[in-house]
Structures are given as C-alpha cells and as structure tokens.
C-alpha cells in the first residue's frame, strides 16, 4: 500500500475559496438578441430572492442513473478514538461514486461483515454480493493530524487493486475522501475521476434591507465546503477558471460599471485581486486561453460588442471580430488555435468559430432559433451550449465534425453549461418548479443529478480543471 501525503496528491490549499457564476435566459428576463448581452447592457439579473442563503449545495438523490451501474461494497471505515470521527469518509466515497451513475453502492445493512483490514475479509462471503470491496480506517496522530488508509479488492481474485495511506489535518479529510473516490473510479473505469475538483458559482440573495446581494463561491464538486470568495451589492457574473485552477476571472459591476477581474484563490499573496479590463462600455465574458497567458473577452469600447484577446503580461489587446452585430461569450478550443462565440449576425443568436490568428468567422450551429454560451469539451470534439426553440432553453451537445445535435436536458430554462475536466458530465444552472439550482447531466444523457441551494438562487456554474 502506497503512502501519500496530501500535498503530493494535488490537494487544494486550505485557504482556497470558491466562486459562483450568475445569469441565464430566466423567466421574466429578456432573451434576445442573446442572454449575455442583455445581462451586461440592461443588468437585468435573474431572480428576486428572499431570505438568507447558505452557500452549501444540497444534493438530492440521483434522478437518473445507469442500469448497468457496477455494484460496489464500501465498508464504514474503522476508527481508533473515543469520540466520533470528524468525518464519515465511507459515506462521502459512497455518495461520490453513486453520483457518477457508474456505481451502485450496496446498503450497509446488506454487508455480510464490517472488516477494516485484509485479514478480516472472508472473500467467500463477499463473492456472493458480486461487488468489488472497499475497506479502510482512520486514526488520529500525536501531532493532531489524521492518518487514513483504504484498500480496493477484487473479491473473486482475492487481489488488492489499489490502496493508499494519507496523512492530513482535519480540514482536509473531505478532500482525502474525494481523492479516494477518484482512485477507485479510475481503477475500475479506466477514466480519471473528478470528485476532487471544484465548482464556482454565484448566488443572489436579499439582505435584511431587501437589497440584492451577490456572492461568488468555490465549493467541492459535490457542493460541500463552500467558501466565499467575494460578496457585492452589485452584480457578479461569468466566473472562469484559469487552467491551473488557482485563479478565477469574473465580471463585477462595482461602481455601477462592468469590469473584469482576475482573482487569486490562495490567501496571503500580493495583488490577490487585479482589475484587468475597465474600458468604457461593456467589459464581459472572460475566457482563459489553455496556457493561461491570455483572456478572450467581450468589449464595446469601440462602440459595438466585439471579441478581443488580451495578453495578460502587458494588457495588449487584439480585436478578433469586426461586424455590426453583437459578438460575445468567447470560449477557447483546447488546442488554443480557435475560439467559438455567440453572434446575432445571422439574425438570431448562433455559434461561430474563428481562428485565433484571425480570419472569417464560420457559423457552426444551424438547428434552432437560439444557440448561445458554447463551451468546448476537454478533447475538443464537442460543444455544449444553450439551445433555444419554441420558448424552451435546454443544454445541447454538438459533435463538431458531423454536426449531430443532441439535446440533453428536458427542463425549459437551462443555462451556463460547463464540462467536467474528464468530459463525462456537464454542469449547468436550471430553473424549474423546484426553483433555481445547479444540475448535471452525463454527455450521453443517461445520468442526471441536481445540486440545490437550501434557500435563494444560484447561477452560472463553472467546473474547475484538474
């Protein structure tokens, strides 16, 4: 069994915070010529919300999962201590794996025993369940930290498939649980897990004085450990992760005007928050280049909303589009060679693509009267975007080479799609009969789950890179 210190496993700093993202073609909100321009020009934000809001997201049961989900037995971890353990690690792992739709954890009451070491495992009994087995334990060290270990077994071959041992303070135990989930997921599926990544989002609430308040949060991928990054009485929009997952770009309407900021997530660093775009008119929709050296953005400093690229080292701007239409919501291709963006130059909002070196934009969406807010899949083969038709706005997936369009969601008001870093899932914001929430759908449309704020509204999610 390999011993891993948490920092070697890529854990986030303990002082990291998380961010929200706000906006969508919501009920009662203008949607033409397209959502983002309406946001910036008219500052019509989505919902009127009452009461205080907790930033932690609540994950209701999975609404749809795979019938072929693998059964897996996750035994409650052993605990050496007189008090209750600070976190039920096995429960976090179980929820992670179940949420993926790829696994069906066996209920605790159906487990034949509760082993915590290999010597306590009777493989004959466990074979009857037809499931892989996860065991582990946790103890407190003299220095106040905790030691956690786990082992994953193939019970038919009586073989350990993987196992690690971690040492970390109590504040990082949930991170360890997500790392264990990632290790199990990758070993059994061959695909890298995303449980230890993070999400950014924006909430809108009303203060005691009935004024709107906007807060940018960063949370674990399951919605737990939400950390406030920034609060404002003016709108916050469009959080975008830097490729190293250590910074966020976003739009703030401080002083009544839109500005683009880059915000370092680690505390106690110099120039933690920098304003990078404060031109006259619109400053919006920041998008990081894959190497993290540039930001694509929407600016109207020359009179019309156009796409620009800014090199962050010297703030040099390069204009990408020159058209009488409104061009906005740029997104980089993973290879850094092209951008997609939303434009109404054809009469309705559609997605266009342009080489980063310059050229004539090429229209790439043709189905539906509204296609906006596109984002590339991590491998660059697909685009996810908001697809509007007959008054419904849903998340759609386009295979770029073939032009095949697949509408993934069934609700009528969905927005802000964001791919998981392994490309298997799309996170988005939705408004339905249950209120506003974050939801996720697998790229084949077969797995769905929902993350809901206890009170208030949540918008514009962004899933971090690894």
Image (cartoon, rainbow, N blue to C red):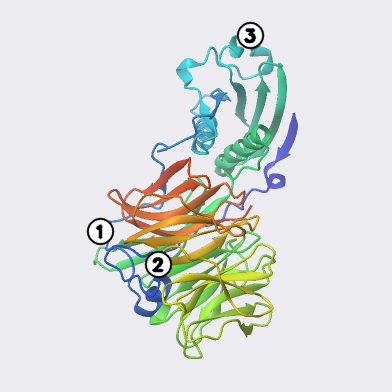
Q: Secondary structure at mark 1?
A: loop
Residue farthest to the right, as pictured: 2
Q: Residue at x 61, y 71 (%)?
A: 339
- Quarter of the rendering occupied by the N terminus: top right
Report x, y in % for residue 109: 45, 17
Q: Residue at x 67, y 22 (%)?
A: 153
Lower sequence index among marks 1 and 3: 1
Q: Secondary structure at mark 3?
A: helix
Give the mark toward the camera: 2 or 3. Answer: 2
Q: Residues within 10 Å of mark 2 (few under 14, many from 20)?
A: some
Report x, y in % for residue 269: 62, 67
Q: Residue at x 60, y 16 (%)?
A: 115
Q: Is residue 242 visible?
A: yes
Check disc 2 and report the residue beneath it: 369
- Reply above or below: 408 against 391: above
Give the mark toward the camera: 1 or 2. Answer: 2
Q: Residue at x 66, y 41 (%)?
A: 191
Check disc 3 and report the residue beneath it: 124
Check disc 1 and report the residue beneath it: 50
Lower sequence index among marks 2 and 3: 3
Lower sequence index among marks 1 and 2: 1
Report x, y in % for residue 367: 45, 63
Q: CA distance from mark 1 to mark 3?
A: 56 Å
Of residues 407 and 109, the one nearer the viewer is 407
Q: Secondary structure at mark 2?
A: loop
Q: Residues within 10 Å of mark 1 (few under 14, many from 20)?
A: some
């Amino acid at each position: 069994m390999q011993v891993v210190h948490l920092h070697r496993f890529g854990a986030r700093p303990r002082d990291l915070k998380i961010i929200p993202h706000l906006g969508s073609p919501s009920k009662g909100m203008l949607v033409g010529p397209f959502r983002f321009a309406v946001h910036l020009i008219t500052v019509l934000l989505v919902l009127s919300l009452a009461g205080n809001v907790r930033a932690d997201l609540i994950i209701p049961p999975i609404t749809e999962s795979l019938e072929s989900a693998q059964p897996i037995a996750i035994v409650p971890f052993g605990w050496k201590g007189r008090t209750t353990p600070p976190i039920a690690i096995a429960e976090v792992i179980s929820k992670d794996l179940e949420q993926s739709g790829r696994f069906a954890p066996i209920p605790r009451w159906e487990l034949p025993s509760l082993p915590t070491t290999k010597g306590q495992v009777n493989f004959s009994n466990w074979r009857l369940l037809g499931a892989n087995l996860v065991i582990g334990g946790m103890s407190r060290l003299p220095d106040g930290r905790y030691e956690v270990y786990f082992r994953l077994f193939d019970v038919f071959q009586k073989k350990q498939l993987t196992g690690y041992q971690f040492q970390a303070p109590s504040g990082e135990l949930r991170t360890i649980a997500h790392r264990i989930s990632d290790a199990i997921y990758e070993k059994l599926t061959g695909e890298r897990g995303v449980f230890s990544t993070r999400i950014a989002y924006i909430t809108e609430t009303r203060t005691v004085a009935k004024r709107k308040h906007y807060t940018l949060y960063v949370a674990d991928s399951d919605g737990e450990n939400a950390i406030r990054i920034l609060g404002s009485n003016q709108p916050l929009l469009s959080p975008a992760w830097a490729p190293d997952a250590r910074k966020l770009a976003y739009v703030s309407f401080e002083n009544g005007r839109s500005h683009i900021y880059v915000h370092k997530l680690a505390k106690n660093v110099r120039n933690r928050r920098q304003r990078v775009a404060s031109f006259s008119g619109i400053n919006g929709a920041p998008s990081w280049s894959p190497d993290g050296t540039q930001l694509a953005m929407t600016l109207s400093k020359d009179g019309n909303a156009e796409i620009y690229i800014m090199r962050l080292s010297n703030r040099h701007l390069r204009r990408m589009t020159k058209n009488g239409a409104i061009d906005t919501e740029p997104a980089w291709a993973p290879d850094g060679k092209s951008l997609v963006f939303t434009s109404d130059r054809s009469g309705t909002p559609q997605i266009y693509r342009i080489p980063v070196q310059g050229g004539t934009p090429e229209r790439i969406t043709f189905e539906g009267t509204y296609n906006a807010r596109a984002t590339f899949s991590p491998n660059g083969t697909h685009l996810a975007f908001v697809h509007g038709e007959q008054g419904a706005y849903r998340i759609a997936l386009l295979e770029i080479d073939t032009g095949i369009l697949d509408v993934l969601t069934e609700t009528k008001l969905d927005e802000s799609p964001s791919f998981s870093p392994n490309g298997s899932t799309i996170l988005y914001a939705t408004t339905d009969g249950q209120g506003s929430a974050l939801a996720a759908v697998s790229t084949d449309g077969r797995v769905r789950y929902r993350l809901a704020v206890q009170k208030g509204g949540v918008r514009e999610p962004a899933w971090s890179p690894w």
